[in-house]
Amino acid sequence: MRDIISELVATIRGRRPVWLGLAATGVGIPAVAAQATGTVLRAGQRIGAAMPYDTPLTEALWAGLGAEELARIAAVDAERLEVERGRLAEQFRRNITAPVYSLKNRFAMWETLVYKMGNGWPPDGYYLIDEYMNDLSNRAETATAIAKLPPGLQAKLKAVLFTIDEQFNRLTAPGGGAEFDRWNQRRPAGIPAALWERRPIDLPWES
């Protein structure tokens, strides 16, 4: 892991081709360092669907990170890339060069949910409950990914994450999970009760 991080730092600082920086490590992830520096899935974009909403907190956070910090994040993203590749048939794995659920994208997805929640659920005023469940899972997994980073970097990321959480709390209300029980949803083990037991004040899945 340390060798990979060193190569990523050199790549980010020197802007040399990423594949040269990673070749010696044997990690076939030519897009990971580019992802860390900002060449990422467009903020708010989900699998197979473009959701081009601004995510200023996420963008400002990443713009203020240093090369070493970006390299640490890129190493975590590299682990996630292998997880996502591992879910595909062998012939498709080589086509996946960056993780959909990179740490930056996770932040952008969570910030996008809050934006949608506070602005009438654009673009059509509707949001599937399964999408909402995915967002809660994403928030829980974001915390897991952050925990793999050094304490100082964790603190920077958590400060912004908790700011988004505060917005989420203002736009939701205690519900004890009853709203999701009504739709035969059960709380996955990875979603903390603090998220599950709140419901959007403006319910987007009501017809």
Image (cartoon, rainbow, N blue to C red):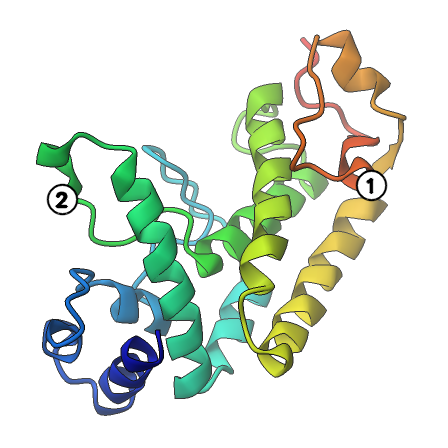
Q: Is residue 128 visible?
A: no
**Side of 31 relative to 106 (left or right):** left
Closest to the observer, 19 or 59: 19
Residue under pointer 2 = 95
Q: Quadrant of the C terminus?
A: top right
* Mark 1: amino acid: Ala
Residue under pointer 1 = 194
The residue sitting at 29% across, 33% down in the picture is: 87
The residue sitting at 46% across, 60% down in the picture is: 104
The location of residue 123, given as percent across then percent down, is: 52, 31
**Side of 117 relative to 15 (left or right):** right
- When the figure is inspected, residue 16 is found, relative to residue 119, above or below; the finding is below
The residue sitting at 39% across, 86% down in the picture is: 67
Residue 121 picture quarter: top right
Closest to the observer, 203 or 104: 104
Q: Residues within 10 Å of mark 1 (few under 14, many from 20)?
A: few
- When the figure is inspected, residue 82 is found, relative to residue 51, above or below; the finding is below
Kind of element beneath mark 1: helix
